[in-house]
Image (tube, helix red, strand yellow):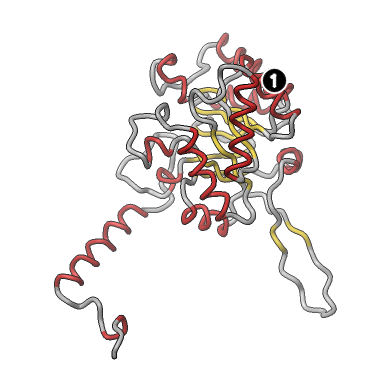
Amino acid sequence: MTEHVSHQRSDTSAPQAPVRKRFRVQDFARSKNDGHKLTMLTAYDGVTARIFDEAGIDLILAGDSVADNMLGYENTLPVSLDEMIVVARSVSRATKHAMVVADLPFGSYEASPIHAFETAARMMKESGAHAVKLEGGARIAEHIHLLTSSGIPVVGHLGLTPQSENMLGGKRVQARSDAAAEQLCQDALALQDAGASAVVLEMVPAPVAARVTEILAIPTIGIGAGTEVDGQVLVWTDMAGMGDWSPRFAKQFGKVGQALSDATRDYIAAVKDVSFPGPEHTFEK
């Protein structure tokens, strides 16, 4: 994980603790050049965003994956721009150090570069996010160029692009053939040339992701793309073990779902047997 620190002068001889600074767009290139692996998680509310921020995460993705992980939609397609702005705003307000990247939802940027700019500008103004993420390759390079030339940092997204899953035939590994791998490389270069600061590579064979990482000057952030990328991102509910199942490319680093279930059962039992609230939770006259 990349640490961004500054050291302040002190009149005493006691060593001063490093002060974490906000991850900025310039830190993408610095991290790649220094070989520091970037860390990124999704978050959809202020509570989890604050926890991840205080733990030292570099980047938080206010992701459109809120649709199927939190809002009960079947996939990411139905989530609206208004819903995404609320998500990104709550995440942005809770963070002090991590860069907040906000997904632009399906249908909110594809029509034209002007369409993308109007949506991205609204997202930045109303949510407080520090960058936006768009799915697609060379076909949206012109969109990204307008955004970046207008002062809006952009993270690209290639490989499995969930907003296009109906065209891709579902959640399938991408760029398996030589031709598809070459197209992925060309798309990545197009995003870089358009001014993207980083590129997410989702469900791409590890050797292909390694090749893309090698040819790009900007960082790659993998999800199901092996280890030879410049960083990793996971959906937080997969990472924390909120359910019994998680994708093959994810690892459960905790059993938060089970802990929450256990706490709920304990609460129910305590209320029913009148052990809660106890004297320490009660106000006297």
Q: Is residue 154 above or below residue 51?
A: above
In the image, 78 versus 273, the foreground residue is 78
Q: Residues within 10 Å of mark 1 (few under 14, many from 20)?
A: many
Q: Nearer the viewer, residue 207 or 74?
A: 74
Is residue 53 shown left or right of residue 192? left
In this rendered view, identify the residue nearer to me: 160 or 68. Answer: 68
Residue 39 in sight: no
Q: Amino acid at mark 1?
A: Leu
Measured from the top left, where is residue 128 in percent x and y? 61, 46
Question: In this orientation, which residue lies closer to the viewer: 44 or 30?
Answer: 44
State the image quarter where residue 113 is shown: top right
- Does 80 sit left or right of 212 as displayed? left
Quickly name the residue at label 1. Answer: 189
| Residue displayed at 23% across by 76% down | 276
Please tell me whether residue 152 is drawn above or below residue 263 in the rendered image. Answer: above
Q: Percent x, y for residue 112?
A: 61, 17
Q: Is residue 246 visible?
A: yes
Look at 82% across and 74% down and name the residue there: 10
Count of labels shown? Answer: 1
Residue in view at x 73 percent, y 44 percent = 27
Q: Is residue 154 left or right of residue 84?
A: right
Residue 164 in picture, x, y percent from top left: 46, 19
Dot 1: element:
helix
| x, y percent for residue 19 | 71, 63
On-image quarter of the C terminus: bottom left
Farthest bottom residue? 285
Q: At 74% from the left edge and 34% from the top edge, which residue is drawn? A: 151
Residue sitting farthest toward the top: 179
Q: Quadrant of residue 170?
A: top left
